[in-house]
Amino acid sequence: MIAQCTNCGMPTTIQFKDQDHPKGIKETYFKCQHCHKRFTCYVTNKAVRAKQKEIRRTRDQATRERLQLEVNQRMKELKADLE
């Protein structure tokens, strides 16, 4: 996957990397090949990963949507806390 870096404007190949943080928090990120700016894609914890698993298992669309909204909000909070 290739994207244009918002920092230097150069096209960069996205190579996702994972980093573990305390309290079971996992961060997925990539770095620009040119300027090496780090871009955090998403951050999860045990509860978020459990809800993601539940989303994959459930067939009820309304439940899936509700759980996905909860996951998105919590991931946004975790990312803000990490930065």
Image (spheres, rainbow, N blue to C red):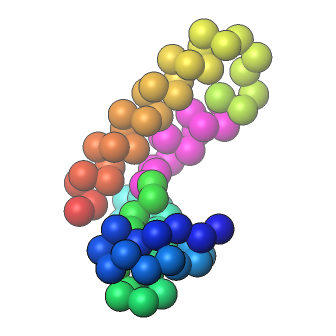
Residue 17 visible to the viewer: no
Depicted 80 relative to depicted 69: above or below: below
- Residue at image position (42%, 89%) is 34
Q: Is residue 59 left or right of residue 48?
A: right
Quarter occupied by residue 42 = bottom left
Depicted 23 relative to depicted 77: above or below: below
In the image shown, does 54 or 7 lie closer to the viewer? 7
Residue 71 picture location, percent across and down: 46, 34
Residue 2 picture location, percent across and down: 59, 70
- Residue at image position (50%, 47%) is 46
In the image shown, does 31 or 66 lie closer to the viewer? 31
Depicted 21 relative to depicted 23: above or below: below
- Residue at image position (32%, 79%) is 8
Residue 22 picture location, percent across and down: 36, 66
In the image shown, does 76 or 36 lie closer to the viewer? 36
Q: Is residue 3 left or right of residue 21?
A: right
In the image shown, does 5 or 45 lie closer to the viewer? 5
Q: Which residues are magenta?
A: 43-54
Q: Quadrant of the N terminus?
A: bottom right
| Total tally of numbered discs in the picture | 0
Residue 30 picture location, percent across and down: 48, 73
Chief secondary structure of the magenta span?
Answer: helix
Depicted 38 relative to depicted 57: above or below: below
Q: Quadrant of the C terminus?
A: bottom left
Q: Is residue 47 magenta?
A: yes
- Residue at image position (56%, 44%) is 49
